[in-house]
Amino acid sequence: MVRRPDCRNHSMKMDSKITPSDDILVKIRDLRFSRGSRAIFDGLDLDIPRGGVTAIMGPSGTGKTTLLKLIGGQLRPDGGTIEVDGQDVHKLSTDNLYRLRMRMGMLFQSGALLTDMSVFENVAFPLREHTRLSESMLRKLVLLKLEAVGLRGAQGLMPSELSGGMARRVALARAIALDPMMIMYDEPFTGQDPISMGVLVKLIRELNDAARITSVVVSHDVTETLSIADHAYVISDGKVVEGGTSSQLRESGGEWTRQFVNGLPDGPVPFHYPAAGLAEDLFGGTS
Amino acid sequence: MGLFSDLGAWVLNALQRLGRASLLLLAMLRGFVDMLYRPRLLLEQLYSVGVLTILIIAVAGLFVGMVLGLQGYYILSRFGGETALGLMVAASLVRELGPVLTALLFAGRAGSALTAEIGLMKATEQLSGLEMMAVNPQYRVLAPRFLAGLISVPLLAAMFSVLGVAGGWFVGGGMLGVDQAAFWNGMQDGIDFQDDVINGVIKSIVFGLVCTWIAIFQGYDCVPTSEGVSRATTRTVVHSSLAVLGLDFVLTALMFGE
């Protein structure tokens, strides 16, 4: 008998709305989104409180990056609503959507630095595009942003000369260039060595507190993510399995969350890929 | 039934792609307004799309003209008509070979580079990154490249024809002893500005538009993987070449038909 994770009726799902509505920056209701015949989100409800670090965790392929693209208006949902700062993202005109994006930063998994520009020019890019700052003021701002991520000395390097961790820090400096109200981090810790990971963990928390912004961290690196998150959600099968504070999730009694948070090889998510019984396969005479 | 459903799916897919390509073309045309305020974006692309293609166009134009001079001389001299060599070389280049070969070479050199560049920008999330920085990549990245292609191809075709005529003159007048005055006078008398030169320019503008549009669309619409970018680059060269040859027939029939 193959076991499938049953996470739809978990008791802690109620915690997915964790703060009063005034303090909610991103409000997602009944979100539905499919790719082909596969449903990625099937009635997802989720609130992201203003001013804190919110983690969205889940196994690979559960649609965490897709969720960020839906919040940023890069993808359109099949149903449901996503409100950012009171505005329904998918009902905005193109101009208004771009205006809203100027208040959102996003750190892509790959960094997404423009490869034909130096580190300095990459960080200066959003400022050049959206402001009329003088060159000297722009230079000061860029150097301050690079100082914040510890890479002022790398201003003259090209993206191809940066390590993975440095590229993400430059991308982070670029994401905060316009002083956004919210930054979305897409798998910021993936593929990082322990030192780079530690630096990124520290930066995300410190930037969030220093600039009083809202941070949304999408990740499957449980330890690092929960160490800086004020609130966290675990999603699977297109819905929120459980939500709450980091400590609530760590101490969760939910079988699914316990398996995910502790990295257990077997549980509601089975170790074995669905298959017929072993005896039947071995002695059944079929190949 | 399988054949019909496959055919139906292919047609639907082709129509969807055509629709997406048309919407992209409209967006890029709207993006031209942006460039009035930021001419530097256009100048950068004119360099990478146009200037860097000059060498291959110049060398090809020169050799094609020299071959035309040789072949033309051998055929015309059979009838004692070698004084018409200048006209033959110039008419062939201005009407047909200049626009067509320039477009084919442009698709191979600049078109494939455009597709690969835009495809890789998509694969490395640079285009998504621009969108999230509230910068429209269709205006900021694609429109300057499109306009640069549109401007470059007619200029490159003119350069191809001029160097081709020079090559024909070098072989005919310089090596084979065709009378130089007859070479240039025959060309001046026989080439009509409206019928030959302007029609050739119109052809090269159309070819430039089609080749650049195909190259940019293939990059923008590709599957964002290394294999997807590779396939898109191949499609750019194949589709552009076929489109140029097919359109050349249609335009020639319209321009020079009775």
Image (spheres, helix red, strand yellow):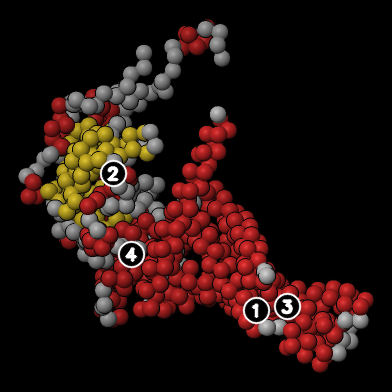
Please give the chain letter of the residue carrying mark 3.
B
What residue sits right under mark 2 in the picture?
A77
**Location of residue A53 in the rendering, given as x and y in whole percent from the top left corner:** 19, 49
Discs 4, 2 touching: Cβ within 8 Å:
no
Q: Is residue B52 visible?
A: no
Residue drawn 16% across and 46% down?
A: A27
* Helix, strand or loop for disc 4: loop
The CA span between labels 2 and 3 is: 58 Å
The CA span between labels 1 and 4 is: 44 Å
**Location of residue B55 in the rendering, given as x and y in whole percent from the top left corner:** 65, 75
Residue drawn 15% across and 37% down?
A: A16
What residue sits right under mark 1 in the picture?
B195
A155 or B144: nearer the eye?
A: B144
Looking at the rendered image, the quarter that the N terminus of chain A falls into is top left
What residue sits right under mark 3 in the picture?
B91
Asked if badge 1 and badge 4 are on a common chain, one would say: yes
Label 1 neighbourhood size at 10 Å, few (<14), some (14-19), many (20+)? Answer: few
A131 or A158: nearer the eye?
A: A131
Amino acid beneath label 1: Asp
Discs 3, 4 touching: Cβ within 8 Å:
no
Amino acid beneath label 3: Ala
The CA span between labels 4 and 2 is: 22 Å
Q: Earlier in the sequence, mark 3 or mark 1?
A: 3
Q: Is residue A186 above or below residue B90?
A: above
The CA span between labels 1 and 2 is: 55 Å
Please give the chain letter of the residue carrying mark 1.
B
**Location of residue A124 in the rendering, given as x and y in whole percent from the top left corner:** 32, 71
Q: Is residue A72 left or right of residue B110?
A: left
